[in-house]
Image: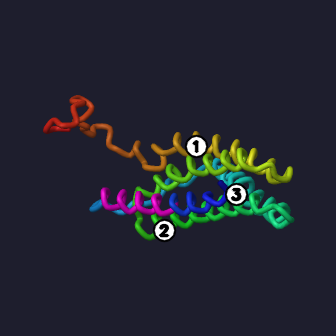
Amino acid sequence: MLERFALLNGLFLVVAAAILVWARWRTRPGPDFPGPRPVGPLFKIWLVVIWLVGMVLPVVALAVDGFGAGQSGTRTILGWYVATFLAQVAFEIFVWKRWRSPVWVIVPCLFLPWRLFQVALGLMLLDGPPLTLLTLWALLILWIINVGVHYSNIPNTLRWDAHPRDADFAALSHPNPFSRHA
């Protein structure tokens, strides 16, 4: 199964890129996305926790546990985890800074469930060193919490409250999406 892990991750990255290209096509033409609102101090602390637990801890576990004899599973699981973490950051920067698109908010929506899958699969497949297992459990907890944090913050990120109070949303009064005014 570990041999297929690389194939699964590579396939995910291709599918994620295709979804983002398709989403970009669906949102054009449109105004440039000004970017997310500035975040408060609590959210900044959360971002530091994400980087420490989500990136630094796996890199440390990979360096400590991944290069011993018989630790190819640790190298595969944590190596691909780190690679997809970095790919997510690269996708976010590209979509936000280069495309200036609201599609930016979709990137974590694609990667967070995949990251949970990666970590859960790692916990099922590895009977590895204690630091690796501790890292995988910490990552599982981190990303479960972050799914809630990210998804609940989407309205703020997309500035949904910026609509004027007298905005007319015809679909609210006529829920049939096939009607002429929806």
The foreground one among 6 and 43 is 6
Where residue 67 appears, as percent x and y from the top left, is 82, 67
Where residue 71 appears, as percent x and y from the top left, is 80, 61
Residue at mark 3 to residue at mark 1: CA–CA distance: 21 Å
Whether residue 42 is visible: no
SS for callout 1: helix
- Please determine whether, in this image, residue 121 is positioned above or below residue 16: above
Q: At label 2, which amino acid type do we have?
A: Phe
- Number of numbered discs overlaid on the protein picture: 3
User: Which residue carries the number 3 mark?
Assistant: 77
- Please determine whether, in this image, residue 134 is positioned above or below residue 58: above
Give the position of the N terminus as an image quadrant: bottom right
| Sequence-first disc among 3 and 1 | 3
Residue drawn at x 32%, y 57% is 27
The foreground one among 36 and 167 is 36
- Furthest-left residue in this view: 180
The magenta-colored residue range is 13-27
Whether residue 114 is visible: yes
The foreground one among 58 and 155 is 58
The foreground one among 170 and 81 is 81
Where residue 166 appears, as percent x and y from the top left, is 27, 37
Residue 58's image quarter? bottom right
User: Which residue carries the number 2 mark?
Assistant: 94
SS for callout 3: helix
User: Which residue carries the number 1 mark?
Assistant: 147
